[in-house]
Image (tube, grey):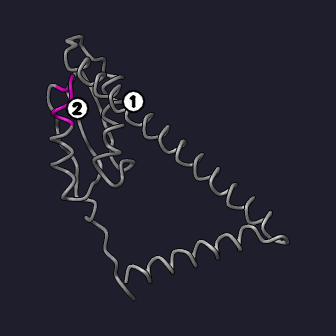
Amino acid sequence: MNALLKTLTVLAAGAAAMYYLDPSEGRRRRALVKDKGASAGRNLKDSARARGRHASNRVHGAMAEMQAGMDDAPVTDDVLHERIRSRLGREVERPGDIEVEVNDGHVVLSGSAAPEEMDALARAVAGMPGVNDVENRLSDGQVGNTNATH
């Protein structure tokens, strides 16, 4: 079995040498292999750079969150409103259907949302820094949505 493996290895090496050292097509084939190798190297380098950048951004974000948690400075209503609007995009499927009003840390959520999203959204907003209380006026997005067929 060992002799067979050696024979097959020698045959494969000979075939590869013939393929790449062919006088008429060998130059093109060698250039193609060189170009593909260079491309793979660039792709690997770009991927490593992107992963490093992603990790760095996550560390910066975690540090910013920690600093924000330690900061006892009051949050203005405008800043709080924008933070809540940003949070809506992560919590509900249709954030444009929800209205947000903020007055001295009192947040009023109105509009429509899916039933399974309403309580989770109110809890998420209530846990945000600067929110004193949340009034949940959200209604089921399914109400009044009758699909009568004629």
When the figure is inspected, residue 100 is found, relative to residue 4, above or below; the finding is above
The x and y percentages for residue 12 are 57, 76
Name the one closer to the observer, 102 or 71: 71
Q: Nearer the viewer, mark 1 or mark 2?
A: 1
* Residue depicted at x 58% and y 79%: 11
Instruction: Tell me the chief SS of the magenta region.
Output: loop
* Residue depicted at x 64% and y 72%: 16
Q: Residue furthest front?
A: 3
**Residue highlighted by disc 2:** 107
Q: Secondary structure at mark 2?
A: strand
**Residue type at the position of mark 1:** Ser
The x and y percentages for residue 64 are 31, 22
* Residue depicted at x 50% and y 37%: 49
Please give left or right for residue 50 compared with residue 23 in the image.
Answer: left
Quadrant (top left, top right, bottom left, bottom right) of the C terminus: bottom left
Span shown in magenta: 125-131
Name the one closer to the observer, 125 or 99: 125
Choose top left, top right, bottom left or bottom right for residue 60. top left
**Residue highlighted by disc 1:** 56
The x and y percentages for residue 56 are 39, 30
Task: Give the mark nearest the N terminus, 1 or 2.
Answer: 1
When the figure is inspected, residue 102 is found, relative to residue 118, above or below; the finding is above
**Residue type at the position of mark 2:** Val
